Image (cartoon, helix red, strand yellow):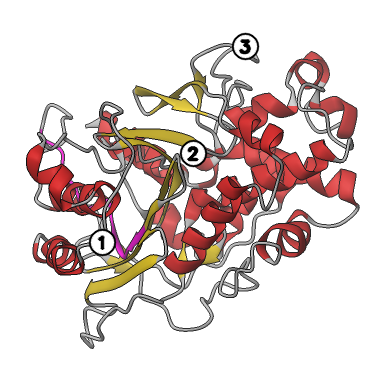
Amino acid sequence: MRRAWIATLAAVAAALHLGGAPAAATTGELDRRELRRSLDAVHTAGMYGVYAQARSGRQEWSGAAGVADVDTRRPVRPGLRHRVGSITKSFVAVAVLQQVERGRIDLDAPVARYLPDLVPGERGQKITIRMLLSHTSGISDHIAGAFPSLLEGSPKSIDDNRFRTFASAELVKLGLAAPSYGEPGSQPGSYSNTNYVIAGLVLAKVTGTGAEDYITRHVIRKAGLRETAFPRSPYLQGPHSKAYENLYGLIDPPRDYSVYDMSWAGVAGNLVSTMDDLNTFYRALLRGDLIGRAALAQMKTTVKVSVAGFTMDYGLGLFPMDLPCGRFWGHDGGVFGMGTQAMISEDGRRQVSLGMNLMKYQRFGPDGQMLPNDIDPALGAFLLKSSCGTDTVTKSAQPAIPLFPTSR
């Protein structure tokens, strides 16, 4: 079962990858009845609460199914604030590329140019800013160091660290202390939150302000987002769901981690947002409202990155998903008790963002292989219907979509 314990760490760093073959661009209106039915099916399959927003051109649909609190049975609603985890990386990458456009950061310059003492020795001269954003630096993830009990199949360190504050420098030290995944620039790279913590420190150095403050002013506000912010305390502000973590059955019944100090993720994954704001952000990004077309092309230039035993294409804070109706771009996020997926079609017409409040509900067999469950197929079906449309899903073979494959 060691594979399951290691998968726990990877799930915290999660990236959701949807597989399929590219085809025609998305078309058609949103089928509100089918979207409602499909989202209800996710709750019926066992997800406590799920909320989503889909867009097609000027059309919008928002829906929610299930409960935000399993004790009071308070229902979830579409506009709840939500910890979006690694989707924060898209915001960080945009901020860095804004500085690239201003000539203050060179993507192919070494980290040592900006932070001479952060990554010691020759390593700091070899690792570039591009390698950080594309997860090809070879730097390991700090998650294992921050939550050591997970390697032993225990949730103890999750509970111990609920109110612990990690400094960014401490997270970087943990990542650098772990064995390297490979030479800087080699492929496949390895998905590591530490890369984006370092990118945030570089951003702070060149702008003279904290990374969170810079992103708030120049990305969040520029995109017109009203419900997106970095947390100032362990407590979620505004209407929100509880966040239930099952840890593959090790926490039974699932425990609420909605109150949690998110400094363990840093700017790699601590952002709070709504599904509406996420769709607005990615639409602004693809329209060229946040960075220019040349910078966006850099974000879309992918390399091979390893995530818990499988290899995916990854750009700079963005990755592609090839569905039966064409290519989508976006990111996912996974933190204790909350999971998120946001995706937008290549032409910018079709979008969906989804949040859920129960994580690592899967189970593993004695051989370490994940057992079938009802939630993953239901989530996959909803994402396909909301992105490709009901007719596309009905008339074509529905691909198996591995939800949060890093938990496998």
Q: Secondary structure at mark 3?
A: loop
Q: Nearer the viewer, residue 128 or 360?
A: 128
Q: Nearer the viewer, residue 377 or 346?
A: 346
Judge the density around disc 1: few (<14), some (14-19), many (≥20) Cα neighbours within 10 Å: many
Left or right, residue 102 beside residue 88: right
Badge 3 amino acid: Glu
Circle 2 residue: 144
Q: Is residue 388 above or below residue 365?
A: below
Rounded to the nearest whole Å, what is the CA distance between mark 1 and mark 3? 46 Å
**For residue 78, what is the image quadrant?**
bottom left
Task: For the residues labelled 2 and 1, say whether their Cβ atoms are less than 8 Å apart.
Answer: no
Residue 183, label in figure:
3
Rounded to the nearest whole Å, what is the CA distance between mark 3 and mark 2? 20 Å
Rounded to the nearest whole Å, what is the CA distance between mark 2 and mark 1? 42 Å
Task: For the residues labelled 3 and 2, say whether their Cβ atoms are less than 8 Å apart.
Answer: no
Q: Is residue 164 above or below residue 395?
A: below
